[in-house]
Image (cartoon, coloured by chain):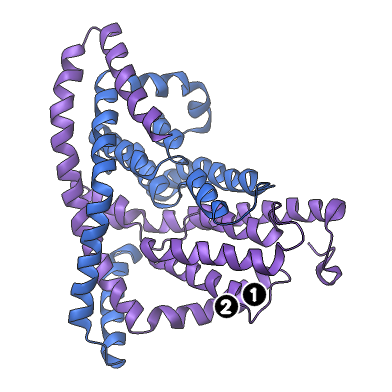
Amino acid sequence: MMKWVFAGLLFFSLVFGIINGDVAAVSDAALSEAANAVTLCLTLCAVICLWSGIMRVAQTSGLANLLAKAFKPVLVRLFKGINPNGKAIGFIVLNITANLLGLGNASTPFGIAAMRELEKEEGVLNPERATNNMVLFVVINTASLQLIPTTAAAIRLKHGSAAPMEILPVVWICSLAAVTVAVTIAKLLGSRGKRHCQTVKPADGGAK
Amino acid sequence: MRVSDFAVPVIFVFVLIFGLCKKTDVFSEFTHGVKEGLHTVYDVFPALFALVLSVGMFRASGGLALISALLSPVTDFLGFPGEVTPLVIMRPFSGSGSVAIFESVLGQTGADSFAGRVASVILGSSETTFYVIAVYFAATKVRKTRHALPAALAGDLTLFILSGLLVGLWFY
């Protein structure tokens, strides 16, 4: 898909450049934006290295695991009918902790492992159909749980923000609202599907 | 002095002291993490370069402004800054693409303007929705993703609408 975005943007920049009679600006932008891309990466490099360093310490010292332990009871309740001692919930907890800490490299492998384990635990009867817990887990991952928006802060600094982190409280409120709405809708739509075609597990039927 | 002034140094100190208490070699682990960070940047650089270049040229041609103008009846009604509209469109599809557009928006409006702050909040509190759904379900045999997409998009929509309102309430 990215090839269409890339080619499309370049194609239309020529078209609009001609329409607006300012092809020179588009031409100038080619070189200045290439230089800008390098500057941007250096700015991001600084912030990413800084946080990777700190978060690596949090991971190896066991702080991340401690956080994971604290979250587990909440998550066991959220994922209805999940085996509380199974592998799936273990990976879900690790994935969500990694997301909170902004460990992008770690969270995706944990997330994929969690999906595979959910499939083994719940998807045996109808492997082509996503289970409610799979949907819920993916939906949580489409919301941003990251506590410190490092990329946004780095680019704000590059553009001379007086306080790059001043957006923090608003980011937290917005993230929380978005994930709450997404989870609520996933739960509502999930329970509607259940009445029609849920095949197993009478134990968790009906609720919410 | 605000909460946001404390967040960063407090996290640094807390993590390092916790590490020392657990007898972790905090220096070598930190430098190890820096190395991993360098690899991350190395990996994203080519895509980011391509997108910053193409978004930058597209903006210079007047294309981004045109998209904002076309959707301005909706965004004006919501009190949403029009300059940020292209970011909202790109956000669910591509991470590098949204960083490129974010960079372009801040270049145009400044980081501490209303539009700059709204864009910052959006980039900081959303994810690449379509990409996440594709990658996670691709790991399984699932073909019917059921209500995953509508629920995820409802979350994104909530965020886009709230970002403008809350930035207005918080800063102005």
Q: Decide if residue A133 is on the left or right side of residue A55.
A: right
Neighbours of disc 1 within 10 Å: few (<14), some (14-19), many (20+): some
How many discs appear? Answer: 2
Q: Among the chains, which one is purple?
A: A
Residue A157 in picture, x, y percent from top left: 21, 50
Residue B61 image label? none
Q: Residue at x 36, y 23 (%)?
A: A8
Kind of residue sitting beneath label 1: Val
Location of residue A137 (image quadrant): bottom right
Chain depicted in blue = B
Q: Position of residue A103 (x, y in %)?
A: 37, 65
Q: Is residue A122 visible?
A: yes
Q: Which residue is mark 2?
A: A72
Amino acid type, residue under disc 2 in the picture: Lys
**What crowding class fits label 2: few (fewer than 14 Cα within 10 Å), some (14-19), or many (20 or more)?**
some
The answer to whether residue A162 of the structure is visible from this angle is no
Residue A192 in the figure: left or right of residue A52: right
Circles 1 and 2, Cβ within 8 Å, touching? The answer is yes
Reply above or below: A56 against A23. below
The residue identified by callout 1 is A76
Q: Where in the figure is residue A20, as x and y percent of width and height?
A: 27, 9
Question: Could you tell me which chain the residue with mark 2 belongs to?
Answer: A
Above or below, B114 against A83 in this view is above
Q: Is residue B147 toward the left or the right of residue A199 in the image? A: left
Q: For mark 1, name the chain.
A: A
Quadrant for the C terminus of chain B, please: top left
Quarter-of-image position of residue A17: top left
Which of the pair B98/B121 is nearer the observer? Answer: B98
Q: Horizontal and vertical percent for residue A195?
A: 86, 54
